[in-house]
Image: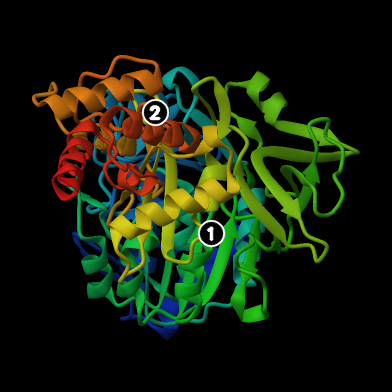
Amino acid sequence: MTDLALPVNAARSRGIGLLEDVVERWAAERPTATACSAPDGVLDFAGLAERTTAIAGALAAAGAGPGTAVALTTGRSRLAVASLLAVWRLGATAVPLDERHPAARTAEALDGVSVLLGKRPPGAPADLPVLDPESARGGPFAAAAGEIAYLIHTSGSAGRPKAVEVTYAGLETALDAMRTLHIGPGGLGINPLSPAFDGWLWCVLLHLLNGVGTAILDLADDGEHVDLAGRIAAVAPRTASLTPSLLASCADALAGAEVVVVAGEHCPRGLLEVLLARHRVLNVYGPTEATIAATCADSARGDDVTTIGRPLPGYLARVLDDDLRPVPAGARGELCLGGPALARGYRGDPELTARRFVTVDGERLFRTGDEVIARPDGQLEFLGRLDTQVKVRGFRIELGELERVVEQLPAVLAATAFVRTAGGTLGVAAVLADGHDPVAGALLVREHCRTFLPEHMLPSTVDFVPALPYDDRGKVDRAALALAADAARPAGRAPATDREHEVCAVFAEVLDQPVTDVAADFFELGGHSLLAARMVAALRKRTGLRASIPLLLGNPNPAALAAELDRLAEVSA
């Protein structure tokens, strides 16, 4: 670093000072150890310290500092971490972006940005200055304190992203909480998430605080999902932070990992049992508005990791009813979070800020929109979103409730319920543990659901997939499941034999709708167990054959059912 001037220690955030200290520590103690690996190369801890200082100096020369916003367009590169730290060293506001997001979304996110750090993404104005971190050479600069550490753009109404303003005070609280997890130095941790979301920040900061290198992985090549398990196995990570949707498809690739962090979604018991047999498991929960992570259950301290645990140090958790009154232990309620880690609000949207950030008994709280149960021991059971309610056949249904019932089965590692675009019926996609037969599994899921759920909540289709589709946050993509289910539906065909005409007529009679497609599924058309009994009775009366409910369950469309009835007729002849 002989050609670089070291920063002057002016006023700065204590949290950013902590990050500077740990970078300097690992650069001194482990200079050649990998700090960041990415598809474009590797940066060691000495290089991380050097590049952070160089980029910060160049940014300062470009006018960056407290009150200015710097868009991070470094993508999934080895300099992404250094670029982030450089912005924070100046007290500026980081705006992480993903170059793969639509140009219109990027343009919205760039509102108020002073400089691009990285490459110019689609949607960026041509006159917005760009600083290349590869060639950055900075002179002296003063470390400074700012108010807003970063903006994360989450999904908003009418397609307009919401910009969550996270403060340096909130970041400091989150860093202090992460330090209490005691991961320990050495090795690599993976980060396969989009740089535009705070899950990416979690992976980077957790690793950096503990002297663990970060292996940035890419979930997609040319827009297509890749073999994530293969890429993880190639890294052989010590730590991994993944959503259950991702973990269900790559758990075996983590065989050598010491610590696995589950976050972002409800984790099924079956998947947790697989992980607990091999790893220290942390079940971490936290919305963007509460600065990355707010609660944690840790198997190393004996927590029940089927819960999301208790609040991390510096965080508050309250479980409240619709009128924002506390609910008793064991009762359902909305999880509301408090403490200095709360975001300032949504940039440019005071109305939404006022709705989501409320004051209760003198405490500023964030309404998460998540439903939990507070157990007598203080651990929080996560039940799901309060806004995943859909309407199917006139009934209001909580998709999360259907998912939880399916995930009670030990053979199911993950499950997601969705509404099919064709016909508006319920479907479930699940990942089965190795060694389980999909045909038998589908029958098991149907019968299990029938035991615990009313008729209107039973899934019309049960599909087993090797992995659930996910978005760039690593969270399950319900829309993709619905499209895939529709695409997999056999092409329609009119009845061609007397038996097929006969079965279609019975379908139409029992379901009270025209049925002219022999590939139409009885359950997708609205059939359920009570109608199945009527269906079997009508088939027996019309054909004189001993049709049965198992026969219908195994052959739910007219073509397959007609073929089986013909076989029954041959045997009976």
Can residue 3 be spotted in the picture?
yes
Q: Which mark is residue 565?
A: none
Could you say where residue 357 lies in the image, as x and y percent from the top left?
72, 33
* Residue displayed at 38% across by 36% down: 536
* Residue displayed at 21% across by 18% down: 516
- Pick the quarter of the image with the C terminus: top left
Q: Quadrant of residue 484?
A: top left
507 left or right, relative to 332: left
The answer to whether residue 501 is above or below residue 247 is above
Q: Nearer the viewer, residue 263 or 189?
A: 263
Secondary structure of the residue carrying numbered label 1? loop
* Residue displayed at 30% across by 27% down: 542
136 left or right, relative to 152: left
The answer to whether residue 36 is above or below residue 529 is below
Q: Nearer the viewer, residue 482 or 18?
A: 482
The three-letter amino acid code for the residue at tag 1 is Gln
Could you say where residue 78 lies in the image, as x and y percent from the top left?
28, 60
Q: Residue furthest right?
A: 361
Q: Quadrant of residue 81?
A: bottom left
Q: Which residue is mark 2?
A: 110
Mark 1 touching mark 2, by CB under 8 A? no
313 left or right, relative to 555: right
Could you say where residue 263 lies in the image, as x and y percent from the top left?
51, 57
Could you say where residue 98 lies in the image, as x and y percent from the top left?
32, 41
Q: Which mark is residue 408?
A: 1
The three-letter amino acid code for the residue at tag 2 is Leu
Q: Quadrant of residue 488?
A: top left
Can residue 54 be spotted in the picture?
no
Select label 1 or label 2 by which is in front: 1
Q: How many marks?
A: 2
Q: CA distance from mark 1 to mark 2?
A: 44 Å
